[in-house]
Image (tube, helix red, strand yellow):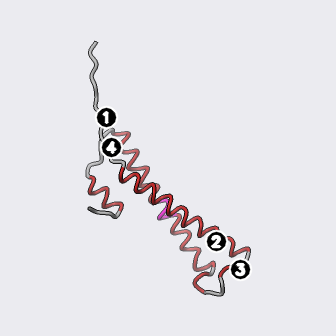
Amino acid sequence: MSEISQAQPDYNYKVVRQFTIMTIVWGIIGMGLGVFIAAQLFAPMLNFDTPWLTFSRLRPLHTNAVIFAFGGCALFATSYYIVQRTCQVRLFSDKLAAFTFGVGK
């Protein structure tokens, strides 16, 4: 019986790691902001009499940070990981993957 050895492809985990780290960062920022504006509903003095820190100004910032930044980074990280693993090939272009992250070499 002959055994055929298949070499494992060298996957691009750098861009997956970058998106995963930014998912965590944006999650902390967005959800922390959500906790802060929820606390403002309980204690309105937390806006410190500053119009820029009111609930109505910070709510869109919270929702956009959670939906687009946190969700988008999570979507890209899982997409780049899953595509490489299921197709068992490396990404087409490392520079294009870095460009989608915004680093562009």
Range shown magenta: 67-71
> Could you tell me what secondary structure mostly forms the magenta stretch?
helix
Sequence order check, earlier mark of 3 and 2? 2
Q: Which residue is mark 1?
A: 8
Residue 69 magenta-highlighted: yes
The mark found on residue 44 in the picture is 3
Q: Amino acid at mark 1?
A: Gln
Q: Residue at x 44, y 58 (%)?
A: 73
Q: Which residue is mark 4?
A: 11
Image coordinates of residue 34 in percent, x first then y, are: 61, 68
- In the visual, does 63 lie left or right of 82? right
- Within 10 Å of the Cα at label 1, are there few (<14), some (14-19), or many (20+) other Cα atoms? few
Q: CA distance from mark 4 to mark 2?
A: 40 Å
Residue 84 magenta-highlighted: no
Q: Quadrant of the C terminus?
A: bottom left
Q: Which residue is mark 2?
A: 36
